[in-house]
Amino acid sequence: MNLSRLGELAAETVAATQHRLPPPLRPLARAVPVHYEVAPDADLLAEGFEPDILGLFTGDPHGEPGDNPSPPQILLYLESLWDYAGEDIAAFREEVRLTYLHELGHYLGWDEDEVAARGLD
């Protein structure tokens, strides 16, 4: 599957996932940009992240004042998601959905335990 098509599938899945969120969460979810990257860059790997990372939230969580110079954003790594899904389209869509929700949880201020408690780990 080519990366362009994976990006389209991922974007469709994120949009559908946002649409299914409870109404009060939809505007918050749509406010944080989602970027579809091929793979993590060298700087991220140098920080100690694994090369097969599926997604990442960067920036300050919603409603929390911070000093992070980068705006909030969610990064989804297409090659890692595709590999993790065993190159199966249905599994890819499901993993995009779960990874997006996991990272959205971080945007909402949930830590790893809170994300896991909601079944998003």
Image: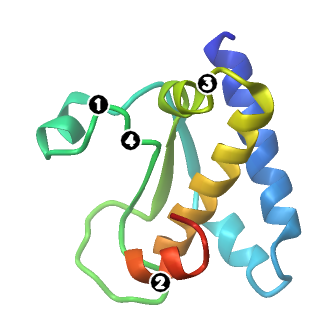
Q: Residue at x 64, y 68 (%)?
A: 31
Q: CA distance from mark 2 to mark 3?
A: 28 Å
Q: Which numbered disc, 3 or 1, marks the residue that appears first in the sequence?
A: 1
Q: Which numbered disc, 3 or 4, marks the residue that appears first in the sequence?
A: 4
Residue designated by label 4: 53
Residue designated by label 2: 114
Tell me if label 3 and label 1 are in contact, CB under 8 Å. no
Q: Residue 86 got which mark?
A: 3
Secondary element under disc 3, as helix, strand or loop, is: loop
Secondary element under disc 4, as helix, strand or loop, is: loop
Which residue is more in the foreground, 55 or 60?
A: 55
Q: Residues within 10 Å of mark 1 (few under 14, many from 20)?
A: few
Which of pointers 3 and 1 indicates the residue nearer the eye? 3
Q: CA distance from mark 2 to mark 1?
A: 28 Å
- x and y, in percent, of residue 20 in the image: 87, 68
Tell me if label 2 and label 1 are in contact, CB under 8 Å. no
Q: Amino acid at mark 1?
A: Asp
Tell me if label 2 and label 4 are in contact, CB under 8 Å. no
Quadrant occupied by the N terminus = top right
